[in-house]
Image (spheres, grey):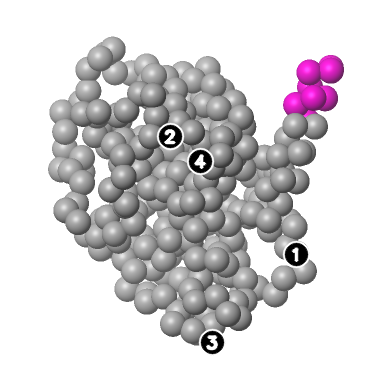
Amino acid sequence: MKRALVAVVVLALVGAAAGVALWSHREDVDAVAIPGGSGASLPPATPQEQGLDPAAMALATRTAQDAGALALGIARRGHLVHLWTAEGDDALVTSPLLARLVLAAGDAARIPPPATPAADDAWAARLSIEVWKPLDAREARLRRRTNAPDVTCCLWLRARDALALAVELLDGRRHVVDGAAAAAALAALEDGIAPRGAEPFGARPARLWRDARGTRLYFFPPQDLVILVVRADEARLTDETLLAHQVLRGIVDLPAGIEPAPTPRDLVPAH
C-alpha cells in the first residue's frame, strides 16, 4: 500500500511540474476546435498479438516515468500495443514536434499552414475534414494566438492521436494523406543529429525526430515499430537510445540477432 501511495504521489508531482504542457491546466484559454471522430485512431492490440513482451513495455514505461515524460505510446504493424499517460488517455498535450507532425500531415494533404492568426479557423476546419476525422482522432484544439508567428506553440492533442498520425505519415496504411508527400514532409523534420546514448543504433535502420521539449519519435522500419515519448525532462533524457532498445529487446517474434531484409520503406529520404 505504501509503495502504491508513493507511486501516486510521484505521478501527481510529475503532472504538476509539467502542467504547462497539459490542456487541463489551460481550460480558461480561448481555442479553435479541430473536431475528429470516435477517438479510436489506432486499432488496439495486445503486445503478445504483435510479437512484443509485456514486461518490456513495463520497463520502457518506467524509463519514461523516470525521465518525467507525460506519455509513452508504442505501435507495431499499425496497431496500438501500449499507451501510458500521466494524466489519462484523453489528456491533451502540446509539444513543438507534435505540432510539426500535424503540420506535416496538413502539407501532405495540401493544406497550407495558416499564415496569420486570422486564418486559423479556416485551417482548423479543413484539417478536421481532410485529416482529423479520417484518422478517427479525438477533438484537438488550437489555442488562439496573438503574437506567435506560427501554430507550433498552440496545438493540443492526445498522445494516442499523435502516435496514430505518425504511423499514418510513416506507412500510409489508411491512406489519409499522400504517401510521397508525407515522406517528404517527415524528411524535412529530421535534424540529422545522431541520437545520444550508451548504445547507438549503429547499422540498425532507425529514424529519430526530436524537439527541445523532451518529445521523441522513433521509427524502426524492419520491425514496423513506432515509439513516441511526449514531454520528458530534457535534463533527465540523457540517453535517447535506452528506452527504444528496451522495446526492441521485447520483440519476441524474430529470431535473436536477425533483422528482416530491408524494404524500400527502410531507406531514409535524401535531404
Q: Amino acid at mark 4?
A: Val
Say which label, 4 or 1, has the lower sequence index: 1
The magenta-colored residue range is 1-8
The circle drawn on residue 229 is 4
Q: Quadrant of the N terminus?
A: top right
Mark 1–mark 3 distance (CA, rounded to whole Å): 22 Å
Q: Which residue is mark 3?
A: 118
Say which label, 2 or 3, has the lower sequence index: 3
Q: Which residue is mark 2?
A: 240
Q: Residue at x 59, y 61 (%)?
A: 156
The one of 194 and 132 positioned closer to us in this rendering: 194
Mark 3 element type: helix
Mark 2 element type: loop
Mark 4–mark 3 distance (CA, rounded to whole Å): 32 Å
Residue 77 visible to an observer of this rendering: no
Number of the front mark, 4 or 2: 2
Mark 4–mark 2 distance (CA, rounded to whole Å): 10 Å
Q: Which residue is mark 1?
A: 27
Q: Pointer 4 and pointer 2: residues touching (CB < 8 Å)? A: no
In this rendering, position of residue 154 left or right of residue 172: right
| CA neighbours of label 1 inside 10 A, class few (<14), some (14 to 19), many (20+) | few
Q: Pointer 1 and pointer 3: residues touching (CB < 8 Å)? A: no
Judged by its main secondary structure, the magenta piece is helix
Mark 4–mark 1 distance (CA, rounded to whole Å): 24 Å
Say which label, 1 or 3, has the lower sequence index: 1
Q: Residue at x 65, y 50 (%)?
A: 90
| CA neighbours of label 2 inside 10 A, class few (<14), some (14 to 19), many (20+) | some
Q: Amino acid at mark 1?
A: Glu
Image quadrant where residue 141 sits: bottom right
